[in-house]
Amino acid sequence: VGEQSATNNNDSSVENTPPGFEYELVLRRWCNLHPSMEFRCFVYNHELVAISQRHPTKFYPHLQPPPPSDESNSNSTSIHPSTTILHAFFQTYIQHRFANGKIHKYVVDLYLDSQERVWVVDFNVWGSRTDGLLFDWDELMELGAQFGSATDVTTTLPQTYDDDDDDDGQYNTEATNREQ
């Protein structure tokens, strides 16, 4: 007696569905990922300009860069091997290939497995709708301007970025589309 059919539930979203529209359920294969090996990569002008660990509230000692060796220059910064692996994957499989090279600013989440294979988890928009994690968006824009055509990759530091330059704190899709 208390049952109600799905077609008779007075749901306004069903009534507002355009004619001929069909829903499609898309599923991802489940994988048990180690959280420390998830990374968010920030791409500006087709260049990888920053990498952040995906879980900014956690400290993973094994992700710290190795100490500089005695024979290396003490002024040089050491890079964790995962940075090199992620950068090589980006250059080989993503750079100028994502959206056929038509989108030059975006964010990509990558996973590095125990065999040093890299997996694409997700692509996201460049801007405040995507969490900058260990970076704030002003910092990412600055890095993009500095390293957009260089090969250096920044791999850490700590919220929102108004990406249409009108200082209203709102994300502007039209301005973003114009830039692309």
Image (cartoon, helix red, strand yellow):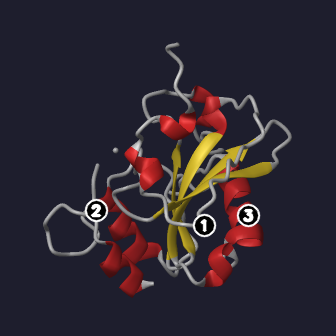
Query: Of tags 2 and 1, which is closer to the observer?
Result: 1
In the displayed structure image, the side of residue 3 where residue 100 appears, left or right: right
Q: Nearer the viewer, mark 2 or mark 3?
A: 2
Q: Earlier in the sequence, mark 1 or mark 3?
A: 1
- Cα distance, mark 2 to mark 1? 43 Å
Q: Is residue 61 above or below residue 93?
A: above
In this orientation, which residue lies closer to the viewer: 168 or 27?
27
Q: CA distance from mark 1 to mark 3?
A: 44 Å
Can you name the residue that lies furthest to the front here? Answer: 1
Q: Secondary structure at mark 3?
A: helix
Question: In the displayed structure, does residue 54 sit left or right of residue 178?
Answer: right
Identify the residue at image location x=55%, y=35%.
6
Residue underneath mark 1: 20
* Pointer 2 with pointer 1, Cβ within 8 A: no
Residue visible at 29% across and 69% down in the picture? 163
From this viewpoint, is residue 96 visible?
no
Task: Rate crowding at label 3 as few (under 14), some (14 to 19) or many (20 or more) other CA atoms within 10 Å.
Answer: some
Q: Quadrant of the C terminus?
A: bottom left
Q: Secondary structure at mark 2?
A: helix
Nearest to viewer (mark 1 / mark 3): 1
Identify the residue shown where x is 24% and y is 64%.
162
Foreground pick, 176 / 23 = 23
The residue at which mark 3 appears reads as 88
Q: Which residue is mark 2?
A: 138
